[in-house]
Image (tube, rainbow, N blue to C red):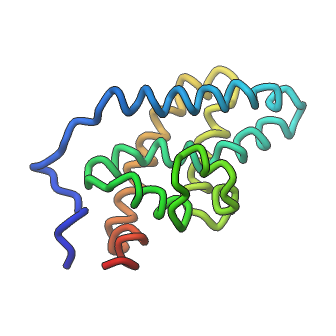
Amino acid sequence: MRLEHQWKEDTMIEQSPLKDLNLFKKAMIVRLLTLPIQLIPFVGGAIYAAMHATFTGWDYMDRYFDAIQLSMHDQRVEIFGKDCRTDCWGLCMPSAYDMNNEYARFGFVCSYLEGLPIVGWTVFPLTNAVAAALFACDIEKSGGLVCLRENG
């Protein structure tokens, strides 16, 4: 039974607001550059969601990763299958767009639902946060993160 990197209710740490702002800046720049894709009728929303899927999934699971005190290196290994040096380099990783990636599938649904007019930005951020908590429960029930099972 592994004790390190396991959910510990009594030792939760508060997430740094600075970390949220840094991720927000990178994500916002990419989202602004790709925003015109959403203007394509019928398929634009799906293409936009697919482009941002892995990073949206990672963003929602970030609270879980912080709760188990997972390093950025281990987060990249978990998300992309191997370390990609920086978060920006992850944009070029083939595994970032692979639909066999659980985080990409989760992020696609989150991103697509949040892109829906009116209800997308009012209702779905809350339901997506609940879905991320349920996803974290599934990960813990299956024995923990894949990157930790392979290393330990």
Residue at 38% x, 65% y: name it.
139
In the rendering, at what x and y percent does residue 146 appear? 42, 71
Which residue lies most toward the front here?
Answer: 85
In the rendering, at what x and y percent does residue 107 appear? 58, 48
- In which quadrant is the C terminus drawn? bottom left
Q: Nearer the viewer, residue 29 or 12?
A: 29
* Relative to 96, residue 27 above or below: above
Q: Residue 145: which quarter of the image?
A: bottom left
**Horizontally, is 27 left or right of 30 in the view?**
left
Q: Nearer the viewer, residue 15 or 126?
A: 15
Which residue lies most toward the left here?
Answer: 10
Residue at 70% x, 42% y: name it.
49
Residue at 60% x, 51% y: name it.
90
Which residue lies most toward the right here?
Answer: 41
How many tags in the picture?
0
In the rendering, at what x and y percent does residue 141 appear? 33, 69
Residue at 59% x, 43% y: name it.
88
Q: Residue 74: which quarter of the image?
A: bottom left
- In which quadrant is the N terminus drawn? bottom left
In the rendering, at what x and y percent does residue 17 appear? 33, 27
